[in-house]
Image: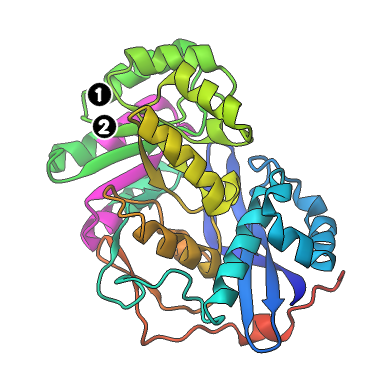
Amino acid sequence: MKASFKKYTLQFKQASGTSRGVYITRDSWFIFLNDGINTGIGECAPLPDLSIESPGKMSVKLLQVCEEISYFSQFPEELRAWPSIRFGLETALTDLRNGGQQILFPSAFTRGEKGIPINGLIWMGTPEFMKQQIRTKLDAGFRCIKMKIGALDFETEFELLKAIRAEFSAEEITLRVDANCAYSYQTALENLKRLSDLQIHSIEQPIATGRWNEMAELCRQSPVPIGLDEELIGILDQTEMKKLMETIRPAYLVLKPSLHGGFAGCEKWFELADQYKTGWWITSALESNIGLNAIAQWTFQLNARAEQGLGTGQLFTNNFDSPLEIEGDQLWFRPEKNWELQNLIKEEADDDF
């Protein structure tokens, strides 16, 4: 088996804002495994200032992985501190074992028989821009809206959510919010009490990470169920994972394979979620359609019931054409549509490799 990699820069169609900043581009690294007949592809997509990996060191580490591919393919846990590379390698190996056709987990999803319910994501921006996104998602048929909050003043964001709830009841539209650590502990509970008036389904990461006791107190008092997102990143030891769950007792876990060490890393959180009776859903982390495809196929075979966060593939101008398609509020795999990966595969060796 031969291994190589390539860096690729995805361009956002429009600036996408969170409370941590605005995304215009994002870098991904693709790892290729070739057995002489087929090529398996995996995507390694760390997020700057969020992943525990340094994007500036990705090429050096991937060079080592490719040179020692026999070792790392047998002992992927050695990449525990490189979760996106572990995800990319895990994906490429699974793809290769299945013939290199991007069918990693054959199912009713990959046969085009069933879709995956997803939430409609509302990015931060001006009130007018956010209103436009909300209307577009509602008109498209989304029944679960997830709005990123924390960049504007709370009153403005509250009014946007209030306008949705005035038009649609909680039975008609589920509202989730993602604060991306935007609130202080002092203001979080007051904000959560007001949000509960709008029958908000859940809030992700209301305060900064690392404040386990404060987060635990919020989870205990909040009338809005709290999901942990950023809080889970970098928690790699099984004992520490259990300690976090025991201390905080969140209502939900928001899991991203690129940030938690691939499918194997997420499955460790599933075990704890079962133990502590905690809900969860899967979210992509701004991968291209290659990473999104792998996450979607894996998610489907988990029999997840809640709406998943898998709608980010349409954000880029230079994504790869794929069988993935959003229709209404579901992500579908259309097997009659082809992948367009020839340019990527043809130049698969990275300039630095």
Q: Is residue 58 above or below residue 37?
A: above
Q: Please tell me which residue is depicted at 28% across the width and 47% down the height of the picture.
A: 306
The numbered mark at residue 200 is 2
**Which residues are the magenta region?**
135-161
Q: Is residue 49 magenta?
A: no
At 81% from the left and 51% from the top, the residue drawn is 56
In percent of width and height, residue 281 lies at 38, 45
Residue 27 seen by the camera: yes
Residue 338, placed above or below residue 56: below
Q: Label 1, on which residue? A: 196
Q: Secondary structure at mark 1?
A: helix
Is residue 19 shown left or right of residue 274? right
Name the one closer to the observer, 53 or 68: 68
Say if residue 149 shows up in the picture. no
Q: CA distance from mark 1 to mark 2?
A: 6 Å
Q: Residue at x 74, y 59 (%)?
A: 72
Image quadrant holding the N terminus, namely bottom right
Which kind of residue does numbered mark 1 sit on?
Ser
**What is the basis of the colouring in this image?**
rainbow
Mark 1 in CB contact with mark 2 (< 8 angstroms): yes
